Amino acid sequence: MDMTVRPRRLRGNEVLRKMVRETRIDSSSLIYPMFVMDGKNRKEEISSLSGQFRYTVDRVEEELEALTASGVGSVLLFGIPEKKDEEGSGAYAEDGIVQRALRFIKERYPQLYLITDVCMCEYTSHGHCGILCGHDVDNDRTLESIARIALSHAQAGADMVAPSDMMDGRVRAIRTLLDREGYLSVPIMSYAVKYASSFYGPFREAAGSAPSFGNRRSYQMDFHNRREGLKEALLDVEEGADIIMVKPAMSYLDLVREVRGQITLPVATYSVSGEYAMVKAAAEKGWIDEESIVCEMAAGAYRAGADLYITYYAKELAKFIQEGRIG
């Protein structure tokens, strides 16, 4: 048969396949989400996130030892306070759960890069991501609190702050306050393209952050929309974001690709709790090969254009990279 072009020539063996691989993954681009909670000497498994735990500050070293041994160097911290109020004041308290965790971890693991989720939903008694006006979240009143939270995290040692509230103008508000207070070098990773998604269910159980009424569709994005995602990303670039995040990952990789094509900043994507939970549940039933699925999902995110990958499988992926099963 007369064929000059034979794509299979470059698939002949493993050495050659790796040599010409288009998407390359390094463990330095992995970010591990971690839950810290008030209290002492407690470690609680999250029922909907098999293998994931909530830790009190005095127990975080158990997880951090395993994390650093795996080669993952970045953590995204979420706080679960003991007490909540209408305005989420615990989110910016000097002795708040995230602030204490930052100081504790920085002292013992200075090599770790600590990113903090900046939001109010875990801290408000109503579970919404901002200050309420009746049953609506007041965007502009919330901005002051969001910026104050980010500043308190920077003061406690955060290397990067990551606002997830989806209020209009919050990146500018954070950047302005951080710069005014001398934290010019603290980057902002914005949850810029964050959809109102059913994939967040297990996280809300983990963080105790489900809204007590209504939903978050008035501030998180409609999952039918593509152009709106680009608008959100470009606005956050203009306001001073340093990294743009698309969330969730698996069902929104078209947006990762779109954003990657429109901006020059690094792009992150978050493989969220629902994605993790589905893979875990199917693997426990013996219906899928967990390792292969995890690797394939990660490769898909990077192939779409992600530079950073936030995943509950960060430790496992780092191991697979080291062993040459992905990367």
Image (cartoon, rainbow, N blue to C red):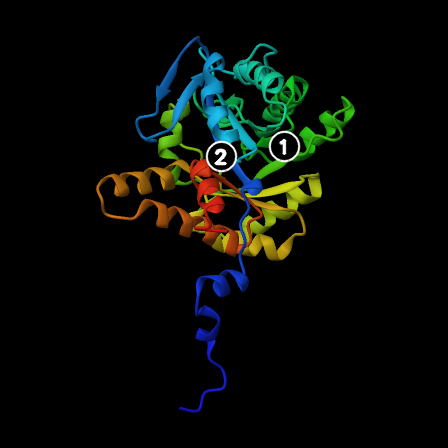
Depth order, front residue of 42/164: 42
Image location (x, y in percent) of residue 35: 46, 24
Name the kind of residue labelled 1 in the image.
Arg
Name the kind of residue labelled 2 in the image.
Ser
For residue 170, the mark is: 1
Residue at (61% x, 15% y) in the render: 103
Q: Would you identify the image quadrant in which residue 2 lies?
A: bottom left
Secondary element under disc 1, as helix, strand or loop, is helix
Residue at (72% x, 26% y) in the render: 178
Q: Would you identify the image quadrant in which residue 44 lies?
A: top left
Depth order, front residue of 262/88: 262
| Residue receiving disc 2 | 70
Would residue 198 be visible to someone looking at this image? no
Image location (x, y in percent) of residue 244: 60, 43
Depth order, front residue of 94/76: 76
Task: Using residue 265 as the reference point, say whether residue 300 is left or right of it.
Answer: left
Residue at (46% x, 12% y) in the render: 38
Q: Reading the chain from its start, which is encountered first: label 2 or label 1?
A: 2
Image location (x, y in percent) of residue 262: 63, 55
User: What is the C-alpha distance between the residues marked 2 and 1?
Assistant: 34 Å
Secondary element under disc 2, as helix, strand or loop, is helix
Residue 271 to residue 63: above or below? below
Image location (x, y in percent) of residue 136: 48, 28
Residue 131 to residue 274: above or below? above
Image quadrant holding the N terminus, namely: bottom left
Would residue 27 be visible to someone looking at this image? yes
Residue at (32% x, 42% y) in the render: 279
Residue found at the very far bottom of the displayed protein: 2
